[in-house]
Image: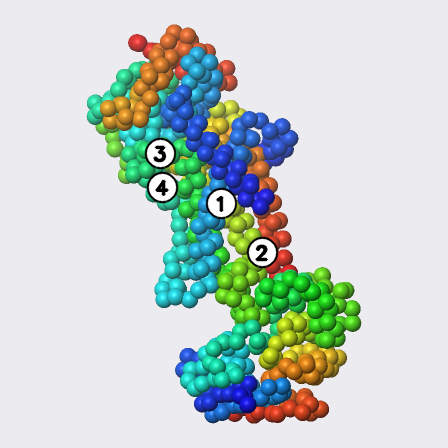
């Protein structure tokens, strides 16, 4: 009987969970792993809650998956970083009100010995050198924003490394991808935030270092988008509008620039620019 | 007078293999019938038919002239008796409780246990079945049948796996229950077991 | 590397001073697992019992199907349920995706074949003399069935514990259907997966050790049921 009582309690608990998810002031966001894993969302979420009273919930997945979730009407808003794909998403009628809010940058990291001799080169030259010397390169391979950015860079260099044996498609998150690059002595494209954490953890034993950085081609634009309520009537448009306005507000933009990891600024606000 | 059991051309097959073939079998009330024969001669099969656990493949079996199942009047003690994962008390009184009887269970428990040679039944009452020896199990299982005061008690090798002391106790229990008017059919490979009883021996010779 | 020693220290710390995130993950884990188990037992125990207890044409085929479903990949269960409960899916109107009830559906489906197969197995393993003994003591068919259930009670306890262990340590369904949402659907296993992807190995190991502790308790229970089932 006691066990039955407990189970009953469990059902009640889960039902109340279901109800709270349905509650009017909850907004569902699909976002990329980098915003969560860098700690930015945990830093901003209490401020957002205090400013708007909205309970923000998010699932952190690759950008491609995030857009899919929104297409299926399972998220109200998006925070993603793959401009070309996002624009197509909006043009196809799945999203509205896309606003740029901030950027961070990618860096190319590689073994300390730099076998392809790419340190200091431009991104395009660096990729060509990696391709020509058949040095190892680990790709996210998961349709994430970072993966999209990497594919764009290869395309800009007119190279198709897909089927080459030096090109490793990991199909995993950024941290796992860096770990693979470190194990295999290969190059990789990474966002700076994940790199800082990775470097910090590895300490002096880190076999990788930054070899290419600062190129404008490596800038990584983040935007917010609202799921199109014409396609998905369940979208909470009023809350979504508040959400979008909050991100571009000057106070929020200032907060973004104040967020640091290991003393280094990660995200650079650029709303309205 | 209608015989207790009356069987003609009794036949039982399991998956095409002949387990029992008996042209005729009669038994009167209050009788002790000893079923003798080698392993595989159909002793256990006949007991299962007499207990109405199974139906014959062919032939007729009547109990007091009826072919219906007198489930509550006949009870069978299987070879290597099975006890539920409960206490001795629970096992012995189970049949009575299945019949919806609630009163006087303790007294009847004590009587039945003493009939199978437990001098202090209450000391055994709360003992779980797994703490019993082979001979004790067999006697407890017998008590669980005696307590029902059945019309017919069917026994399948009741002394097969027990020590000499338990065997003696079980035999005297059988004598006791016969005296109270219950008819008994007992299968055994040792036909000499009942030499001191006034028993009728039926030899089974089913060829497989 | 020190991951293990750090992880162990963190685990002790986590257990001593439960922070919100940890308690929330533990409670989400136990709530969803508990509900899923309740549903799976409600449906699975009767079906499993009938499957093991009765004889009917096609019985062996049913057993084969249910045994095959034991090996159903959890991500496939996740995917199928996902397609059903997404807003675009047939059950979309209920808004179940990325909620605990959504997870419960997937986990109940995961647990159901375990409950059915193991219950059927327990009934089949029951000594055939038990049923005959009950019949010869004058039990009616219903009484025989009820007493048989009582006779395998420790095996049924084992079934519950096994199904619980399978669901509580599962990550695919919880991740796909729950979405690993903080303070809501983040369970022990999805939290470990997240900490690993963030590179917080020590934190991941700490949570893993808490999960191992739960597994230890489960195994203690199993050992107890097994002992009881054999002796009693």
Q: Quadrant of residue B180?
A: bottom right
* Residue mark closest to the camera, 4 vs 3: 3
Secondary structure at numbered mark 4: helix
Q: Is residue A206 visible?
A: no
Name which of mark 1 and mark 3 comes first in the sequence. Answer: 1
Q: Answer few, some or many: residues within 10 Å of disc 1's Cα (few below 14, many 20 plus, some between 14 and 19).
A: many
Q: Is residue C56 above or below residue A153?
A: below
Name which of mark 1 and mark 4 comes first in the sequence. Answer: 1
Provide the residue designation for mark 2.
C154
User: Mark 2 and mark 3, same subunit?
Assistant: yes
Name which of mark 2 and mark 3 comes first in the sequence. Answer: 3
Q: Which mark is residue C94?
A: 3
* Residue mark closest to the camera, 1 vs 4: 1
Question: Numbered disc 3: what chain?
Answer: C
Spot occupied by residue A59 in the image (x, y as percentages of width and height): 40, 29
Provide the residue designation for mark 4.
C81
Question: Numbered disc 2: what chain?
Answer: C
Q: Contact, CB < 8 Å: mark 1 with mark 3?
A: no
Q: Please state the total of marks drawn on the protein image.
A: 4
Name which of mark 4 and mark 3 comes first in the sequence. Answer: 4
Residue at 58%, 56% in the rendered image: C154
User: Mark 1 and mark 4, same subunit?
Assistant: yes
Q: CA distance from mark 1 to mark 2?
A: 17 Å
Residue at 53%, 60% in the rendered image: C146
Q: Contact, CB < 8 Å: mark 1 with mark 2?
A: no
Q: Nearer the viewer, residue C230 or C193?
A: C230
Q: Quadrant of residue A109?
A: top left
Provide the residue designation for mark 1.
C38
Q: CA distance from mark 4 to mark 3?
A: 13 Å
Question: Numbered disc 1: what chain?
Answer: C
């Amino acid at each position: 009987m006691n066990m039955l009582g407990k189970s009953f309690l469990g059902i009640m608990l889960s039902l109340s969970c279901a109800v709270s998810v349905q509650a009017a002031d909850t907004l569902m966001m699909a976002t990329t792993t980098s915003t969560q894993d860098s700690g930015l969302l945990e830093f901003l979420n209490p401020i957002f809650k205090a400013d708007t009273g909205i309970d923000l919930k998010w699932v952190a997945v690759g950008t491609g998956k995030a857009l899919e979730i929104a297409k299926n009407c399972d998220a109200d808003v998006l925070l993603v970083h793959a401009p070309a794909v996002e624009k197509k998403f909006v043009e196809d009628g799945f999203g509205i009100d896309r606003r740029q809010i901030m950027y961070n940058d990618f860096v190319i990291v590689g073994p300390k010995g730099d076998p392809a001799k790419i340190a200091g080169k431009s991104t395009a030259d660096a990729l060509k050198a990696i391709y020509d010397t058949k040095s190892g390169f680990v790709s996210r391979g998961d349709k994430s924003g970072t993966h999209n950015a990497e594919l764009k860079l290869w395309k800009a260099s007119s190279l198709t490394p897909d089927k080459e044996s030096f090109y490793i498609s990991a199909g995993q998150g950024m941290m796992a991808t860096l770990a693979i690059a470190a194990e295999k002595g290969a190059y990789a494209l990474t966002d700076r935030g994940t790199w800082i954490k990775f470097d910090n953890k590895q300490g002096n034993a880190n076999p990788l270092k930054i070899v290419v950085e600062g190129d404008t081609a490596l800038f990584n634009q983040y935007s917010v988008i609202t799921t199109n309520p014409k396609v998905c009537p369940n979208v909470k448009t009023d809350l979504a509008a508040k959400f979008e306005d909050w991100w571009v507000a000057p106070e929020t933009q200032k907060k973004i620039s104040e967020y640091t990891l290991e003393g280094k600024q990660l995200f650079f606000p650029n709303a309205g620019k | 007078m209608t015989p207790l059991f009356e069987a003609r051309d009794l036949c039982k097959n399991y998956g095409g293999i002949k387990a029992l073939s008996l042209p005729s079998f009669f038994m009167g009330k209050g009788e002790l019938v000893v079923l003798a024969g080698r392993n595989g001669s159909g002793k256990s099969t006949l007991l299962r038919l007499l207990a109405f656990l199974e139906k014959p493949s062919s032939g007729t079996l009547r109990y007091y002239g009826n072919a219906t199942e007198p489930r509550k009047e006949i009870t069978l003690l299987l070879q290597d008796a099975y006890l539920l994962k409960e206490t001795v008390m629970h096992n012995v009184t189970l049949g009575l409780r299945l019949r919806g009887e609630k009163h006087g269970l303790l007294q009847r428990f004590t009587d039945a246990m003493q009939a199978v040679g437990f001098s202090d039944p209450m000391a055994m009452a709360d003992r779980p079945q797994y703490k019993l020896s082979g001979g004790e199990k067999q006697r407890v299982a017998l008590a669980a049948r005696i307590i029902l005061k059945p019309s017919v008690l069917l026994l399948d090798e009741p002394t097969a796996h027990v020590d000499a002391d338990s065997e003696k106790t079980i035999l005297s229990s059988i004598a006791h229950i016969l005296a109270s008017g219950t008819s008994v059919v007992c299968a055994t490979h040792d036909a000499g077991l009942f030499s001191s009883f006034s028993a009728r021996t039926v030899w089974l010779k089913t060829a497989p | 590397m020190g991951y293990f020693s750090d992880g162990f220290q963190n685990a002790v710390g986590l257990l001593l001073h439960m922070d919100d995130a940890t308690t929330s993950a533990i409670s989400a884990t136990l709530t969803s697992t508990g509900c899923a188990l309740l549903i799976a037992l409600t449906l699975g125990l009767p079906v499993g019992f009938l499957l093991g207890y009765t004889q009917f044409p096609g019985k062996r085929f049913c057993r084969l199907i249910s045994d095959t479903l034991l090996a159903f990949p959890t991500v496939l269960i996740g995917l199928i349920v996902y397609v059903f409960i997404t807003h675009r899916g047939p059950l979309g109107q209920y808004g179940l995706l990325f909620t605990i009830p959504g997870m419960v559906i997937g986990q109940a489906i995961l647990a159901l074949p375990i409950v059915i197969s193991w219950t059927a197995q327990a009934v089949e393993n029951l000594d055939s003399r038990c049923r005959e003994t009950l019949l010869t003591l004058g039990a009616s068919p219903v009484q025989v069935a009820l007493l048989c259930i009582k006779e395998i009670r420790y095996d049924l306890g084992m079934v519950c514990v096994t199904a619980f262990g399978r669901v509580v340590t599962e990550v695919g369904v919880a991740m796909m259907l729950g979405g690993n949402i903080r303070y809501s659907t983040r369970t022990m296993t999805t939290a470990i997966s997240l900490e690993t992807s963030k590179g917080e190995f020590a934190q991941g190991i700490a949570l893993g050790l808490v999960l191992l502790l739960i597994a230890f308790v489960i195994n203690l229970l199993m050992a107890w049921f097994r002992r009881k089932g054999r002796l009693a």
